[in-house]
């Protein structure tokens, strides 16, 4: 599956638009990660536990979007976008979305 953030794929011709595709996941914080993050906020710096958690969430959302595109018969996704939002205290949603297409 080709995935790009642009509305075209260099060197490829879009043959057919298959439509909107998306994938999402909701991740909650882990108490152990919260404790480690709390310590990190005192001394400053990157909170690697959350960075890893959000990277995993992005990969899950993108994977689900790819599955959605495959069910529509697409072999590429253009205009990939990622968004996040808080859905409740200590939980965030990551959504990946784009336009499924077929290219030659």
Image (cartoon, helix red, strand yellow):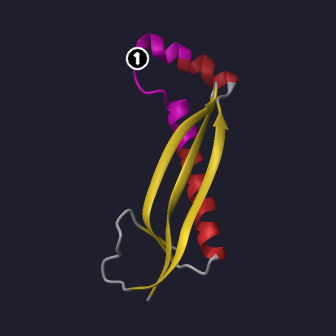
Q: In this rendering, is residue 26 above or below 43?
A: below
Give the percent coordinates (x, y) of residue 90: 63, 26
**Magenta residues (range):** 38-54
Say which residue appears at 47% left-offset and 15% top-offset: 41
Task: Tell me the residue at 37%/86% (across/down).
Answer: 13
- At 34% from the left edge and 74% from the top edge, which residue is drawn? 8
Given the current orientation, which residue lies at the most extreme top position?
42
What residue occupies the far left of the structure in this picture?
A: 10
Q: Secondary structure at mark 1?
A: loop
Report x, y in % for residue 12.
Answer: 36, 84
Is residue 100 within the magenta segment?
no
Q: Position of residue 80 (x, y in %)?
A: 44, 61
Judge from the rendering whether residue 35 lies leftward or rightward of residue 1; answer left or right: right
Q: Residues within 10 Å of mark 1 (few under 14, many from 20)?
A: few
Q: Which residue is disc 1 drawn over?
A: 44
Could you tell me which residue is drawn at 56 percent across and 53 percent down?
59
Compared with 73, 94 (above or below) is above
Q: Quadrant of the C terminus?
A: bottom left
35 and 75: which one is in front? 75
């Amino acid at each position: 599956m080709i995935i790009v953030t642009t509305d075209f794929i260099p060197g490829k011709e879009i043959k057919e638009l298959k439509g909107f595709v998306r994938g999402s996941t909701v991740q909650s914080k882990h108490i152990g990660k919260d404790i480690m993050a709390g310590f990190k906020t005192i001394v400053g710096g990157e909170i690697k536990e959350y960075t890893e958690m959000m990277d995993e969430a992005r990969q899950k959302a993108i994977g689900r979007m790819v599955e959605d595109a495959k069910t529509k018969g697409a072999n590429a996704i253009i205009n990939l976008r990622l968004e996040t939002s808080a859905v409740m205290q200590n939980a965030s949603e990551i959504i990946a979305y784009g336009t499924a297409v077929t290219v030659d």
